[in-house]
Each structure stands twice: as C-alpha cells, then as structure tokens.
Image (cartoon, helix red, strand yellow):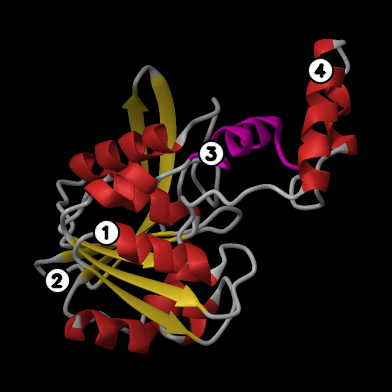
Amino acid sequence: MAKRALHVNGVDYEIGYEILHPEQAQTIVFLHGWGANKEIMKKAFGGVFKEYQHLYIDLPGFGASSLHVPLVSLEYAAVVRAFLEALHVTPEIMVGHSFGGKVATLLNPSTLVLLSSAGIVPPKPLGVRVKIALFKFLKRLGFGRFYRLFATKDVQGMAPVMYETLKKVVNEDMREVFAAYKGRALVCWGEEDKTTPLQSGEEIARLIPNATFYPLQGDHFFFILHGARIERALKEA
C-alpha cells in the first residue's frame, strides 16, 4: 500500500491506495462504500479485469486516508479528482459501491459501474422523522451533545468528523446527477439489498440514458462473490 499527500481547497489529506497490474495502459478505479475501505473492493475484483491497471483508493476518513473536516460528496469527488491528477491517471472505468457510487458518478467517467449505489433518498419512516425532529428541538435548546441517544448502532462510536460527514451526505439526492450522466453505465444490484433497495437501482437505471440494469443474488455486499459476472456483464453491455 502507498500514500499520497494532497492539498485540496485549503485542506491537507493523506490518501491510501494500492495499484495492481501497473503494466497495463488503461486504468480502472474502485471506490468503496461507507464504513468500508479499499480492501473489500480488492477482494471482489483483484482477480478480474486483468487487462486494466487497478487503482484501489481509501476515501478520506476510511482505511489509511485522513479526514480532518466534514465533507459533502462533491468535495469527496474533488479530492479524488485531485488525487487522480497527482498520479496522472485518467480512468477508463470507475467502479463505485454504495457511497462510492455517488462519488464515482460525480467524477463523470466515460464508463461507470454502480454497485448498489447510494443517491436515491427514500421517504423516512414516521419513527425516524419523529427522532430527527426531537433531536433538532433538543439541539436548539443546547442539548445537541446528546445526539448519541438518537444515533443508530452504525454511528455510535464514530469519530465526530465522520458523524458530521455522514449527516451531510446521507440525504443528498442524486437524481439530477444520474440523469445528467452521458457515459455508459452498468447498474448492478443485490436482489436482497435492504440498505439501498432494488427499486433504487431500477430508478437509477431509468435515469441514466445509456444504462444497463443487472440484478444479482445477494445483499448490499453482493458484489464480493460476483466479480467475474460483473466483468462479463460490462463486456456484454
């Protein structure tokens, strides 16, 4: 694994990354989802797409990459763009899982592979809306420090900068961004995905003009067992 120091929009970052097949001329970039790191993408795809140089990146705040200020997805995309420019890499394909799918779409590659991508915000259940309203009320009264009473198990113990980032990115609606993407897209989805439901994938595939929808057996992390099938689907799309 290597690291690259960056200075983007007044903020310093260290980005952890790994390259496989450096002898290949064309590059495929892999962006992981929230709470993960580059290793999960390497596990899924390290043995396929062998005609490409693989670039696995830890997004800021995950794995070996630093994060000191909260970011929105557009700012994540700006950091990744600066990183690619620093490495003099123009990817032919970008593969993004979940949150990484949002970042990959914002980078507008010529070919995009989305794996159970975030970006379609479903209506919140009543219980969640009540919890959010109560938290906002307490925050106005000066009791925002008690946010952990309202946090899910997924965010308990999270570093403050990551929690603030999560609050910024979780409700970003990307419908207009998907609709504006003009490249070629393969939209892959886990048929039993409960995190980003199958209907979200179907909607993304409808929004992107040149998209192929490809559901596969599995949950939000379906792709771990389907690297070869995803490679084959992209060649056939």
- The amino acid sitting under disc 1 is Ile
The answer to whether mark 1 and mark 4 are in CB contact below 8 A is no
Q: Secondary structure at mark 3?
A: helix
Q: Amino acid at mark 4?
A: Lys
**Residue 38's x, y, as percent?**
46, 61
* Residue 39 in sight here: no
Residue sitting at x 26%, y 46%? 107
Give the camera-side residue of 27 and 130: 130
Instruction: Name which quarter of the figure residue 193 lies in.
Output: bottom right
Name the residue tied to disc 1.
208
Label 3 and label 2: CA atoms lie apart by 36 Å
In the image, which is nearer the foreground, mark 2 or mark 1? 1
Q: Secondary structure at mark 1?
A: loop
Q: Are marks 3 and 1 in contact (CB under 8 Å)?
A: no
Cα–Cα span, label 4 and label 2 = 54 Å
Q: Which mark is residue 169?
A: 3
Q: Which residue is mark 2?
A: 23
N-terminal of the two: label 2 or label 1? 2
Determine whether the residue tagged by mark 2 lies in a helix, strand or loop: loop
Give the x, y percent position of residue 43. 47, 76
Pointer 4: what residue? Answer: 139
Q: Residue at x 49, y 54 (%)?
A: 118
Q: Residue furthest left?
A: 25
Label 3 vs label 1, nearer the camera:
1
Amino acid on which the number 2 mark rests in the picture = Glu
Q: Which residues are magenta?
A: 157-172
Magenta stretch: residue 171 in it?
Answer: yes
Which of the two discs, 3 and 1, labels the residue nearer the N terminus? 3
